[in-house]
């Protein structure tokens, strides 16, 4: 089955009969009137996917396009707790749909059975919801409720093997995405929030690979088992501002791995030190002289040997982790002007309305991801952000064919052709693009 056919089949399942079943289960649709479960779901998801700050009038217009003429007031009355429960379960079902495109034709990625990046993103919720989604708290009673999205994303195939919703105060290091067993031969790239020498040991035992930033304070030993003072060791052993040596990690674990250290320009180091001082001041502390000195280096650890991966290739792969931030930009919160504005809702909205809108947007994010997999993933020169923006112009076309399998297949195929044309990234001589670095890591300007 082609990728387009798989996406169409999944769309028909989530936006079709499954929606009707779940709507009846949660009492959203009790008697057959104007709305059915699928038409109600389509109205919410497709309106918010096209216009993230949509109001009730926008939703009513979409309902009319779906053949359900209703007033703005009728739409507003649909925002009840059963609707929230219905949408939340649809989110859960959508997260379970595992769609993977053909691996991108990049040799560096294809050395591994999978290249999995993991990260989380948090967003604030109405303060009426701290029991279900406790936040970390904040000033003057704010931040009482928050939600965290945990994601594992395979950069080879675009598959999302895990997408989880957790309370905002949940620890990244203890998240199930950090505990998931790895496929032998795969590579895992997570940020410092998930740093754990014990986890690295488990990955090595599972015959998987990892690349991570080094967590300050983690013991580093040389091969004979002597503790290294990195503040002194790095300058003394750098060759052209690079250190690449076998070490052992952790006082107890003494995990054999490789330390890669690259000295950064002084202006970069000074910016890091300024941020470190500001952060420490907020917590009534002073950063240590050792910590400030080591901020002049970018430090990585990996269990991949030199003969399998050069230090430049290791850094390029670690930098590929920021691609998951693009996924978050497509869905929620890290950009000042996020694409789908998951964290935003109508001014004056009740907690119930805010949560219904959030779950509907998350369903839209998954729908968008599936469409982008079929349309933009095969070309490593793709820009998912460009493709997502272009996709909005096709929402009306999709609305009209959702109940006609052949026409839906035809429309998604046309969408695939369109996005493949408009979503390409051009090569750059200065500051090479992500796809250029993956193709040729020697282009990496490692001093920047």
Image (cartoon, grey):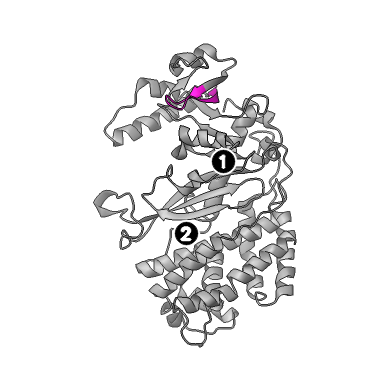
What percent of the width, then of the height, locates residue 206? 58, 38
What percent of the width, then of the height, locates residue 54? 49, 69
What percent of the width, then of the height, locates residue 251? 42, 24
Quarter of the image for the C terminus: give it: top right
Identified at 43% across, 70% down, the residue is 85
What percent of the width, then of the height, locates residue 441? 67, 31
Q: Which residue is mark 2?
A: 342
Q: Secondary structure at mark 1?
A: helix
Q: Secondary structure at mark 2?
A: loop
Magenta-colored span? 248-263
Q: Which residue is mark 1?
A: 321
Identified at 75% across, 69% down, the residue is 410
The reply to whether residue 154 is visible in this rendering is yes
Q: Label 1, label 2: how many angstroms apart (C-alpha)?
A: 22 Å
- Quarter-of-image position of residue 14: bottom right
As displayed, is residue 331 above or below residue 447? below
As displayed, is residue 230 above or below residue 283? above
Judged by depth in the image, the label closer to the viewer, 1 or 2, is 1
Identified at 60% across, 74% down, the residue is 16
Is 200 positioned to the left or the right of 441 in the image?
left
Q: Is residue 7 magenta?
A: no
Identified at 51% across, 67% down, the residue is 90
Residue found at the very far left of the displayed protein: 140
Q: Residues within 10 Å of mark 1 (few under 14, many from 20)?
A: many
Q: Is residue 258 magenta?
A: yes
- Quarter-of-image position of residue 285: top left
């Amino acid at each position: 089955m082609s990728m387009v056919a798989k996406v169409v089949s999944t769309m028909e399942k989530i936006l079709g009969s499954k929606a009707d079943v779940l709507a009846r289960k949660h009492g959203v649709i009790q008697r057959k009137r104007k709305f059915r479960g699928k038409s109600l779901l389509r109205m919410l998801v497709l309106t918010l996917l096209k216009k993230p700050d949509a109001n009730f009038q926008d939703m009513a217009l979409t309902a009319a396009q779906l053949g359900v003429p209703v007033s703005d007031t009728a739409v507003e009355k649909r925002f009840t707790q059963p609707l929230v429960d219905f949408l939340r379960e649809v989110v859960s079902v959508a997260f379970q749909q595992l769609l993977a495109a053909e691996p991108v034709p990049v040799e560096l990625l294809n050395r591994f059975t999978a290249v999995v990046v993991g990260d989380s993103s948090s967003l604030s919720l109405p303060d009426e919801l701290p029991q279900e989604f406790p936040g970390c708290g904040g000033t003057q009673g704010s931040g009482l409720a928050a939600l965290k999205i945990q994601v594992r994303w395979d950069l080879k195939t675009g598959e999302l093997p895990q997408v989880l919703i957790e309370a905002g105060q949940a620890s990244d290091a203890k998240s199930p995405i950090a505990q998931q067993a790895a496929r032998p031969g795969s590579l895992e790239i997570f940020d410092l929030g998930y740093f754990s020498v014990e986890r690295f040991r488990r990955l090595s035992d599972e015959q998987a690979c990892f690349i991570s930033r080094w967590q300050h304070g983690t013991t580093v030993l040389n091969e004979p088992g002597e503790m290294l003072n990195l503040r002194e060791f790095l300058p003394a052993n750098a060759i052209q501002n690079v250190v690449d040596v076998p070490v052992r990690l952790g006082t107890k674990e003494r995990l054999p791995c490789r330390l890669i250290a690259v000295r950064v320009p002084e202006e970069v180091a000074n910016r890091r030190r300024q941020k470190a001082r500001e952060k420490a001041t907020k917590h009534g502390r002073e950063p240590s002289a050792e910590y400030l000195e080591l901020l002049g280096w970018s430090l990585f650890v990996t269990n991949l040997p030199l003969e399998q991966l050069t230090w430049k290739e290791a850094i390029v792969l670690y930098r590929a982790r920021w691609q998951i931030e693009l996924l978050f930009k497509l869905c929620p919160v890290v950009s000042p002007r996020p694409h789908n504005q998951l964290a935003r809702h109508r001014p004056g909205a009740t907690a119930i309305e805010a949560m219904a809108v959030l779950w509907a947007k998350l369903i839209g994010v998954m729908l968008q991801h599936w469409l982008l997999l079929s349309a933009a993933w095969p070309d490593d020169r793709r820009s998912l952000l460009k493709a997502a923006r272009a996709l909005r112009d096709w929402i009306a076309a999709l609305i009209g064919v959702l109940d006609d399998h052949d026409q839906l297949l035809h429309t998604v195929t046309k969408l695939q052709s369109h996005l493949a044309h408009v979503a390409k990234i051009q090569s750059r001589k200065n500051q090479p693009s992500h796809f250029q670095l993956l193709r040729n890591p020697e282009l990496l300007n490692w001093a920047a």
